[in-house]
Amino acid sequence: MDMNTLLESLYENNTSAGQEKTAEDAMFAQLSDAPKQDNPFMDLPMEDLVKLAQDLEVAPVGEFEADASDSEDLEKTAFDMLGGQVMAHAMVHEFGLMKQAMAEGYCRVCKTNPMDIQGSSICTECLSE
C-alpha cells in the first residue's frame, strides 16, 4: 500500500462508525448486567491490610541480578519503544501539517498546490503521481 492510498483511506468517510457505536452499546449493556464483584479487602481493618502487604514476598530493588540476556532484551525493548515514540510523534506532526494545509485550501499531500478536485483533499498533480 502506497502513502497516497493509506492517506485516502484515513480521510474517506467512515461508514463503520454506526457499527462501532452499536458494538460499544452492546458491550456496555453486558457490563451493566454482569454481577458486580465485591472487594474482599473492603471490610478488613487497616492493621490486617498492612500485615497482608508485609507478608507479600517481594525482592528488594537492590537484590535483583540481571544476566546478559535480560540486559539485551531490555535494551531491545527500550530501542523499540523509543522508535515507536519517535514514529508516533512524527505522525502526529504530519497530521497537524495536513490539517493546516487543508484548512488553508491546499493539498494534504504536497501542501503547496491548491485543492482543485471537487470533493477531494488532494490536487490533480499528486493524484497523477
Image (cartoon, helix red, strand yellow):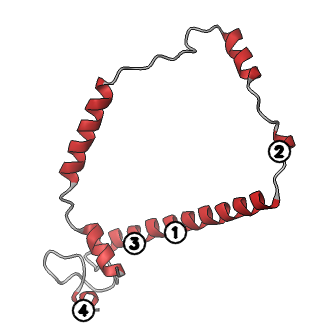
Dot 4: element: helix
According to the image, label 4 marks what residue? 128
Mark 4–mark 3 distance (CA, rounded to whole Å): 22 Å
Of the numbered discs 1 and 4, the one sitting upstream in the chain is 1
Which amino acid type is shown beneath numbered disc 2?
Phe
Horizontal relation, residue 86 to residue 52: left or right = left
- Mark 1 near mark 4, Cβ–Cβ under 8 Å? no
Q: Which mark is residue 52?
A: none
Going by the numbered disc 3, the residue's amino acid type is Leu
Q: Earlier in the sequence, mark 1 or mark 3?
A: 1
Where residue 8 appears, as percent x and y from the top left, is 27, 74
Disc with the residue nearer the chain's start (4 vs 3)? 3
Residue to which mark 2 is pinned: 64
Task: Estimate the spatial distance between the alpha carbons at disc 3 and disc 2, rounded to whole Å.
Answer: 46 Å
Residue 117 visible, this angle: yes
Picture coordinates of residue 98, whole percent (x, y): 35, 72
* Contact between labelled residues 2 and 1, with CB atoms less than 8 Å apart: no
Q: Tell me which numbered mark, 4 or 2, is placed earlier along the sequence.
A: 2
